[in-house]
């Protein structure tokens, strides 16, 4: 059976050759934090990391990630504590219905690792691969900027 | 009806060619999958065999080789974006890549896939065609090369035979005194281009245009190189490429367009925008080369 590494753990998973990574994560591994909205790679709801790179999992065959490290929204945070990006979305109310939120948080997490001190324009641009149908975009961008601030503060305290 | 394909994972490029030669058109190469998955889900393609290329890391590179840029067919759009610093022309390639789909799809979408999918509005075609890019193709009988503008032969059609694979795209003369620019009109950020245009100008040592490129996307079954428009730039100094000449060249480009009306735009709009986008592309090239605008 194929072996998938998800959030640091190996899983033996049985799937059909044409099954998408998003459906295997949701239906076979019960990791339903990854959402599927458009199923065409346009809305970003299904964003996960493959070897650290943000990827629309609805466009990937599950067979294409054998031997690679998958991270889903469930893999963020440590010891039961939310990741600072997740907490910032709560603090700034960066969502309304919440369906697109995991995808936005994954995209934001990847973005902030590359650009820890973004301008508002850069944050806007970085979030353009995700669609929020409730229209919470201004709050989402505020959340990203808050997260950037909190991560910097946290680093200062820890190191 | 349950649809199904058999999944094959070659470990080397030659193994991929062997598998394709064995299964012919009942097999499809599957790279990043950003086009293939949609076509599979939509029932546009129903291969019996999926030959997954995503493990062929030997074809995933963007590297400068002397005065050329060599891009492996499996380099992602994100790879191209991240290698925007390898000579002036790679910046134009990076800017084109950034216009395409979304960040989280650019990490899987490949350059080879964009070209082999053969869409008339594929963004990478005009940009690479004006630069004079050449493609390297591998088949059971070895390698062959051809100019990219001959590679695209129709809607969803390329010059690849059933048993061949695109392995590399080579952009020549990246360190010359040259500039390229691609621009397009699309409905939304993530949508495909309705119409697009790219221009390229290379100056010789004597300061006159030695090589020029004008190519259009979305206004013909294939990417459309407009040689007549290119010729109008040859031998000119930057200063002599004035607004009147730019207008004439754009008119020439527009008259080559054979646009159609579809759900995205009308024939008339596409044709008109061909001229607008070509003007902008030429102006950008001149500006980048330090000419007066």
Image: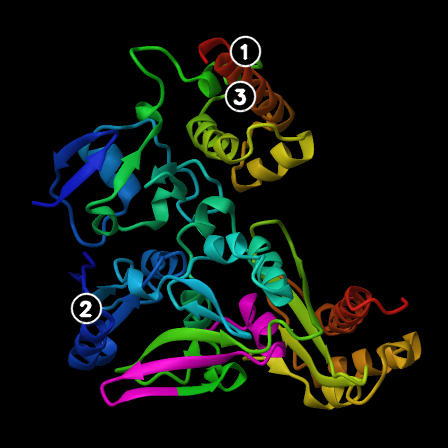
Which chain letter matches label 1? A
Residue A156 is labelled as none
Cα–Cα span, label 3 and label 2: 43 Å
Q: Name the element at disc 1.
A: helix
Q: Is residue A118 visible?
A: yes
- Which segment is the magenta one? B118-144
- List x then y, in percent, for residue B89: 62, 67
Q: Residue at x 85, y 77 (%)?
A: B238
Q: Residue furthest left?
A: A1
Task: Classify residue B37 by image quadrant.
Answer: bottom left
- Asked whether residue B125 is drawn in magenta, I would say yes
Q: Name the element at disc 2.
A: loop
Residue A91 is labelled as 1
Taking B174 as reference, is A5 above or below it? Answer: above
Badge 2 vs badge 1, beta-carbon distance below 8 Å = no
Task: Classify residue A30 by image quadrant.
Answer: top left
Viewed as shown, does residue B142 lie left or right of B89? left
Q: Would you name the residue on which mark 3 appears?
A: A95
Q: Residue at x 40, y 44 (%)?
A: A56
| Front residue (pair A85, B223) | A85
Q: Residues within 10 Å of mark 3 (few under 14, many from 20)?
A: many
Q: Is residue B218 visible?
A: no
Q: Would you name the residue on which mark 2 appears?
A: B48
- What is the quadrant of the C terminus of chain B in the image? bottom right
- Asked whether residue A92 is drawn in magenta, I would say no
Which chain letter matches label 2? B
């Amino acid at each position: 059976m194929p072996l998938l590494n998800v959030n640091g753990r190996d899983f033996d998973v049985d799937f059909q050759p044409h099954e998408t990574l998003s459906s295997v994560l949701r239906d076979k591994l019960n990791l339903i934090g990854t959402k599927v909205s458009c199923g065409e790679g346009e809305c970003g709801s299904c964003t996960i990391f493959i070897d650290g790179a943000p990827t629309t999992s609805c466009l990937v065959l599950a067979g294409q990630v054998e031997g690679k490290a998958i991270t889903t929204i469930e893999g963020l945070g440590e010891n039961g504590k939310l990741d600072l990006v997740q907490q910032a979305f709560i603090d700034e109310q960066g969502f309304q219905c919440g369906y697109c939120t995991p995808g936005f948080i994954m995209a934001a997490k990847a973005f902030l690792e590359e650009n820890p001190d973004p301008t508002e324009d850069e944050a806007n641009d970085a979030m353009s691969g995700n669609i929020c149908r409730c229209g919470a975009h201004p709050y989402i961008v505020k959340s990203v900027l808050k997260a950037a601030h909190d991560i910097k503060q946290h680093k200062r305290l820890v190191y | 009806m349950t649809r199904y394909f058999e999944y094959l994972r070659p470990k080397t490029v030659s193994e991929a060619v062997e598998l394709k030669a064995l299964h012919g058109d009942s097999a499809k190469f599957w790279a990043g999958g950003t086009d293939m998955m949609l076509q599979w889900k939509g029932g546009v393609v129903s291969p019996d065999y999926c030959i997954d290329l995503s493990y062929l890391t030997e074809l995933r590179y963007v590297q400068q080789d002397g005065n050329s840029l060599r891009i492996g067919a499996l380099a992602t759009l994100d790879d191209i974006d991240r290698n925007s610093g390898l000579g002036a022309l790679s910046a134009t390639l990076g800017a084109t890549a950034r216009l395409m789909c979304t960040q989280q799809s650019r990490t899987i979408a490949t350059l080879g896939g964009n070209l082999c999918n053969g869409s008339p509005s594929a963004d990478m075609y005009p940009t690479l065609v004006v630069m004079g890019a050449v493609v390297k193709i591998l088949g059971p009988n070895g390698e062959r090369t051809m100019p990219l503008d001959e590679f695209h032969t129709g809607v969803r059609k390329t010059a690849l035979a059933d048993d061949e694979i695109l392995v590399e795209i080579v952009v020549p003369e990246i360190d010359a005194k040259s500039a390229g620019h691609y621009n397009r009109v699309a409905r939304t950020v993530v949508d495909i281009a309705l119409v697009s245009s790219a221009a390229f100008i290379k100056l010789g040592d004597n300061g006159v245009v030695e090589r020029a490129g004008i190519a259009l996307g979305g206004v013909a079954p294939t990417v459309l190189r407009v040689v007549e428009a290119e010729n109008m730039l040859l031998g000119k100094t930057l200063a002599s490429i004035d607004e009147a000449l730019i207008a004439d060249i754009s008119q020439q480009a527009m008259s080559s367009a054979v646009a159609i009306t579809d759900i995205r735009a009308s024939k008339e709009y596409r044709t008109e925008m061909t001229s607008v986008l070509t003007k902008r592309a030429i102006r950008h090239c001149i500006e980048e080369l330090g000419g007066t605008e």
